[in-house]
């Protein structure tokens, strides 16, 4: 728990299921608002076919905007999601600093999301990850549907671990487990991450939980106890994979930060700045977002240890 990193995925996972297309200028405004929050990583978008996900059509332009004008806090990292070699090529051309790429442990979800089997996607992702590392980029690989699938139900632990082992054999040590369908529960979270640590205690572990069945924050705490240091979340609790059976929002970034701060962690994050951006997003979509702290406000008292 010495260092916990917040990876904001609202611009990608948060927007990909929205019907309204957010203009480039609005996205830039939200991103610049997050600059003052002191978070660690912002995922600007994914490099996918714009005909399938028109919300991501301006991802290249977003990266170019910030790489060309240099307006970014020094310690902030911009990440991008890639699914294939074309996406990697686009990302390398427009200034991505950290590449995220994943393989689904569910064959059904893998086909719907990428048009590839799990094995095919794994082989291609490992080759792409190595190429990105050769280009001196940060790389995080993931196992999607690691805790269950909306189409197939439970996913065998052995299937998940076989993907993890392939990553480790390829020398890939930054690994995320994604709860794409929101099926995870805390005991399962501790078991999977604990097994990864037994395989290799030097792994840089990350988690990505959806709040489909209300266990998102509980799963984050279980991950924290298990040695996970990177937490992916979305402002306001927006989001959901459009290629799963029941898309539902991510863990709310403000709720996650608030819970950490109540435990005396990540008090350097400016929660009110985060809430300001989440409110702007809610106003844009003209609806109440799922996040709880957006409604209740914070009760963290920085002068008294815990609130």
Image (cartoon, rainbow, N blue to C red):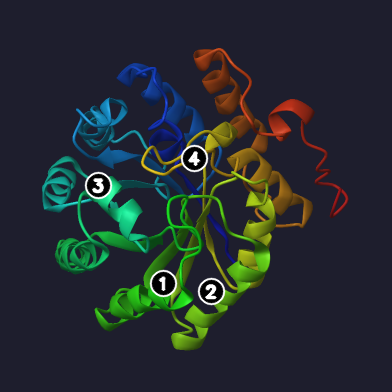
Which dot marks residue 282? none
Residue at position x 59%, y 16% from top? 287
The local crowd at label 4, few if under 14, some if 14 to 19, many if 20 or more residues have their Cα within 10 Å, is some
Q: Are marks 1 and 2 in contact (CB under 8 Å)?
A: yes
Closer mark to the observer between disc 1 and disc 3: 1
The label number, if any, that marks residue 96 in the structure image: 3
Q: Which residue is mark 2?
A: 192
Using the image, tell me which numbered label, if any, was put on residue 246.
4
Looking at the image, can residue 177 be seen?
A: yes
Q: CA distance from mark 1 to mark 3?
A: 28 Å
* Depth check, front residue: 202 or 49: 49
Spatial CA distance of label 2 from label 4 is 23 Å
The mark closer to the camera, 3 or 2, is 2
Q: Position of residue 167 (x, y in %)?
A: 30, 75
* Quadrant in which the N terminus is drawn: bottom right
- Residues at marks 1 and 2, CA–CA distance in whole angstroms: 9 Å
Number of callouts: 4
Q: Which residue is mark 1?
A: 160
């Amino acid at each position: 728990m010495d260092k916990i990193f917040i990876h904001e995925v609202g611009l990608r996972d948060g927007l990909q299921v929205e019907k309204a297309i957010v203009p480039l200028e609005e996205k830039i405004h939200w991103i610049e608002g997050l600059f003052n929050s002191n978070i660690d990583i912002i995922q600007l978008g994914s490099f996918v076919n714009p005909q399938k996900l028109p919300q991501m059509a301006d991802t290249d332009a977003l990266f170019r905007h910030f790489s060309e004008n240099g307006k970014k806090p020094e310690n902030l990292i911009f990440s991008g999601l890639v699914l294939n070699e074309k996406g990697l090529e686009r990302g390398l051309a427009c200034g991505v600093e950290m590449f995220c790429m994943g393989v689904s442990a569910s064959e059904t979800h893998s086909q719907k999301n990428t048009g590839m089997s799990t094995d095919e996607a794994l082989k291609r992702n490992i080759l792409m990850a190595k190429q990105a590392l050769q280009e001196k980029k940060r790389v995080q690989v993931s196992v999607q549907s690691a805790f269950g699938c909306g189409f197939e139900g439970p996913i065998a632990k052995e299937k998940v671990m076989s993907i993890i082992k392939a990553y480790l054999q390829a020398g890939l040590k930054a690994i995320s487990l994604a709860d794409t369908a929101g099926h995870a529960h805390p005991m399962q979270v501790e078991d999977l991450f604990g097994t990864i640590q037994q395989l290799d205690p030097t792994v840089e572990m990350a988690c990505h939980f959806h709040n489909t069945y209300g266990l998102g924050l509980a799963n984050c705490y279980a991950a924290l106890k298990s040695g996970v240091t990177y937490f992916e979340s979305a402002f306001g609790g927006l989001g959901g994979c459009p290629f799963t059976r029941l898309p539902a929002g991510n863990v709310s970034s403000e709720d996650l930060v608030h819970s950490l701060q109540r435990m005396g962690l990540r008090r350097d994050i400016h929660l009110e700045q985060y809430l300001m951006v989440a409110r702007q997003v809610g106003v844009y979509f003209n609806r109440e977002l799922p996040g709880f702290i957006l409604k209740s406000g914070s009760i963290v008292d920085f002068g008294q240890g815990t609130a």
